[in-house]
Image: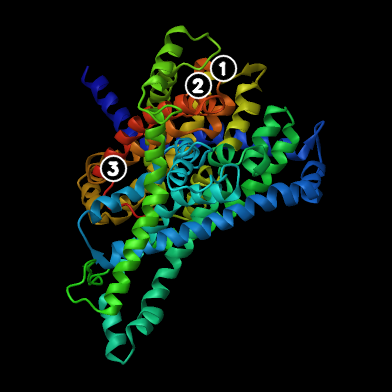
Amino acid sequence: MSRVSASVRRAARALEQRLLTLVAALTAVVLLVLFYYPVATVFADAVLADGRLTVEPIAAVLTSEFYLVDIIWFTAKQAFYSTLASLALGLPAAWLFARFEFRGRETLRSLTILPFVMPSIMVAIGFVATFGRNGTLNRALSLVGLPPVELLFTLEAIVVAHAFYNAPLVARVVTAAWESVDARTVETARSLGASPRRAFRDVVLPQLLPSIGVGATLTFIFTFASFPIVLALGGFQLATIEVFVYSRVRDLAYAEAASLAVVETAVSITLTAVYLRYEAGQRSAGGAANPLPRRSVVPSDWTPKSALRTAGIAGYALVVGLVFVVPIASMILASVTGGDGGFTLANYAFLAERQATGASFQVKPLPAILNSLAFAAGTLVVAVPMGVTMAVLTTRRYRGRGLIDVLSMAPFAVSGIVVGLGLLRGLVFGVDVLGTRIRVTGALAIVAAHAVGAYPFVTRNVAPLFARLDGRLVESARSLGATRTRALVDIELPLVWTGVVAGAAFAVAISIGEFDSTIILAEGAGSYTMPVAVERFLGRRLGPATAMGCLLLLVTSASFLVVDRFGGRWGEL
């Protein structure tokens, strides 16, 4: 018996020694099956015809005036304008957070995390409720005797909605960099005779430019691959690559869809590689030992300069209120008002009636809510272990780590539409393995798409914490006989647990709000999620869509509270 026990202990210790390697290998297999193979399937549609290599589909896209001008150029143009608008709104916010102290500062700063937990289809609903023909804006104009304006299905509406989504990202990234500026370098410049403006230009601005560049890069990536906002506010008449890929998939024109997806993915991956190069350099950079002092928004000594600055801050606050508060308030207001502007719960009653009497092919709210929660739970189970494993792999020193980092973050650069199309063409339609047809359909396919999109956010939350741990802690545990896996479980994971919790909250929020891949993979009304239900209602009646959007807001707010509680001052992506 003792020999058996000893053998079991030896086997357990051998497994423990190799467990991290096995988990890493399993993660690689999951990524290969759920991401790289499906995406490769999409790319194969663009370069294969009847089993032969061909460049005709891609060449047809790149030489077509319609695709180049109306689709690709418009996509790049709206992303460029959206980036400029996001910078214009986000940089003043970074200046306020980094250089001023005021009541509610930390709360407002926490709200800069909203772009990552707020579903984009909900933002789109808010802007429809604001800029629609009977929206908040036109109602306000009518009260002062001004004519209505038509902003829906315009480039301006898309750009403003993208700025709503991405300006907080710019503010968060640049604020973190601004607070890392050492005040002593500014003081040295001033002591050498530099004016405040010259000191800012020569000392502070060069330290901010990389973060401004990365904020602009991330914004361009997100807006270049934007789908729900463009679909809701621009429609097919203002189609981006993402929207047109979806249109081609609906028409079963897979070669055209794949060719456009190749172009979009090439741009996104290139820009993501640029971001990762910057982020890798920032991991080892700590905050300033002596950050710049903050001053009060309300000056103690009123001068023309301070009065002008305060007036500018007040004007900016008004713009922020119009861009960020009005759309969400409009969605909530539209959900409880009727055509005459009076209070009503008819929209919520409609949802209840649809749930009770709706046909099987119609969208019902309760199954959509339950599906969203079930898919989020499945995403959590898959994405968190994958994200933590990748965080470990990308913070260890070994040859080829940079390549692993890029490969692990590839899902971040590939749009949900492309992932959904790949899963549809690959695993949903089925693949032959050793004479057996293997298919992954329904909930499993949707969870796979959600997990692939969510796990990079887990990695980005946990990796910085791993990188800052004192390596001597692990060395001490190893010297006492602990295996590498035991040191990870007993020493490192407890120290980075807040990042794991924040990453898990991100994974849940991203799954609940995910729209792009879900709308391709959902098999009928029975597998619709809350964002898809919102979009389906929006195509018919705004009121029920806003009511469903408010329910979605309640669910995602819980994720935001968890991220805000455990995410700390999460300034890196």
Circle 3 packing at 10 Å, graded few (<14), some (14-19), many (20+), is some
Cα separation, mark 3 vs mark 2, equals 39 Å
Query: How does the figure colour the protein chain or chains?
Result: rainbow
* Residue 524 image label: 1
In the rendering, at what x and y percent does residue 71 appear?
70, 47
In the rendering, at what x and y percent does residue 133 appear? 54, 38
- Residue under numbered circle 2: 528
Q: CA distance from mark 1 to mark 2?
A: 7 Å
Check the image and name the residue furthest to the left.
300
Q: Position of residue 214 (x, y in %)?
A: 47, 60
Disc 1 to disc 2: CB gap under 8 Å: yes
Residue 327 in the image, given as x and y percentages of width and height: 42, 42
Q: CA distance from mark 3 to mark 1?
A: 44 Å
Name the residue at 24% across, 43% down.
565
Quadrant location of the N terminus in the rendered image: top left
375 shown above or below 207: above
Q: Which residue is mark 3?
A: 488
The disc, 3 or 2, on the residue closer to the chain's N-terminal end is 3
Image position of 569 with respect to 282: above or below: above
Q: Decide: few, some or many residues near mark 1? Use Cα within 10 Å; few <14, some 14-19, many ≥20.
A: few
Q: Helix or strand or loop: what does disc 2 sit on?
A: loop
Q: Amino acid at mark 3?
A: Leu
Q: Comparing marks 3 and 2, which lies closer to the viewer?
A: 2
Residue at 35% x, 47% y: name it: 113
Q: Is residue 251 above or below residue 571?
A: above
